[in-house]
Image: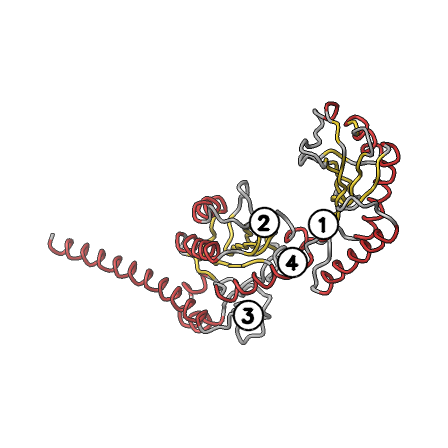
Amino acid sequence: MDSELQIGLAALGVAAVVSIVGYNKWQERKHRREAELAFKSEHRDVLLEPNDGGASVDERLEPSVAGRGERHGHAAARDPGLRKATPRPPEQVDSRVDCIIRIESIEPLETPRLWAAQGEQLMGISKPVRWYGFDDAQNVWRELNAHSAGAYHWFCAAMQMVDRRGPISETDLMHFSGGVQRVAETFFAVPAEVPSSGETLRNAAELDRFCAGVDVQIGINIVSSGQPFPGTKIRALAESNGLVMGNDGAFHACDEDGNTVFTLSNMEQNIFAADTMRNIATHGMTLLIDVPRVPNGVFAFERMMRQAAQMAEALQGIVVDDNRSPLGPEAANMIRNQIQHFQAQMASGSMAAGGQLAMRLFSD
């Protein structure tokens, strides 16, 4: 009886030691990773180097659990070299525009669990935040949402640093970086790299200054010389030229991809809406080009001028500038030159007008 009790207690002791050793090994790995990151440059992606056997950085070497268990002597000697490379950020994000944090989960983490945790931790951030999971089988990042399934080892969170409301605040940055780290800790995951707050805020401020310098909207007006313009006639003229009523109270002229080229809106208080156009009469309308969001600004301006001239003639109105002065050829040419100047300035900053990056940055 005493012998059986002693054997049982010894077995429990061994199990406890194994548990403690296992936990300590995990903590050791986590702290070793954090220590390594602390000594790496803030300006590099953290890429874990491959072993000396010739594997390239792009190869993802998965550790073999069976190998460690079956051949302790040889496998243990090779294990330190079998290190996975941190996947590069998704193509959909840009380090010039996004604050990027990648995290590694020791075990595959189900997306719904991560999504619920990040929703709690990142609630209230004023800038857009996107999440991605790395598909090891396809070697590609998948953008995640509330309906995403699957499980991943690697995740990436990207917060946009600038939009038309300005750059990120220090509060938002701390909320984002701290929230992502808390999500990682919840699932025993490890951030691959946490960006420097000072450098991130400086980069955001510099980018915001550049955007402010090219953020131009150019408008021309059609005004009545007597009787107001009836809403039914405005709608008929707009739709006959392919303009579409939007949810923002304006008609939109669009390109082949459905992107807005220019808008037509009421100069007076009442907005244009499908169910109220027959009751509207106005003394003026504005046609507007959002210069950073249009790929070929001069072409868009020419199309807008043709629309304005046609509507002014049909409604017996006058095309004028913001000072109510008639818009002649000289003024029109000056506007063309301004559009060319601002869009060339954007191109010099590797930010094509109307491109994906510009559409993100020049959003409300």
**Which residue sits furthest left?**
2
- Label 1 to label 2: alpha-carbon separation: 32 Å
User: Identity of the amino acid at label 3?
Assistant: Arg
Q: Which mark is residue 44?
A: 3
Q: Residue at x 61, y 61 (%)?
A: 207
* Residue 109 image position (x, y, % from top left): 47, 50
123 up-or-down from 271: above or below: below
Q: Earlier in the sequence, mark 3 or mark 4?
A: 3
Disc 3 is placed on an element classified as loop
Q: Position of residue 253 (x, y in %)?
A: 78, 40
Looking at the rendered structure, the kind of residue marked 1 is: Gln
**Residue 279 in the image, given as x and y percentages of width and height:** 72, 23
The secondary structure type at the circle numbered 1 is strand
Task: Give the quarter of the image for residue 319.
Answer: top right
The mark that comes first in sequence, 1 or 3, is: 3
Pointer 4: what residue? 211
Give the mark, 4 or 2, whose residue is nearer the N terminus: 2
Q: Residues within 10 Å of mark 3 (few under 14, many from 20)?
A: few
Give the residue number, with chain letter if any, for mark 1.
217
Going from N to C along the chain, the mark reached first, 3 or 2, is 3
Which residue is labeled 2 in the image?
143
Count neighbours of disc 1 (C-alpha within 10 A) and say few if under 14, some if 14 to 19, many if 20 or more: few
* Front in this rendered view, residue 71 or 125: 125
Numbered disc in front, either 4 or 1: 1
Q: Is residue 274 left or right of residue 21?
A: right
Residue at point 54% right, 59% down? 99
Helix, strand or loop at label 2? It is strand
- Give the Cα separation between the discs numbered 4 and 1: 13 Å
* Residue 139 seen by the camera: no
> Is disc 4 in contact with disc 2, using a CB cutoff of under 8 Å?
no
Q: Which amino acid is tagged 4? A: Cys
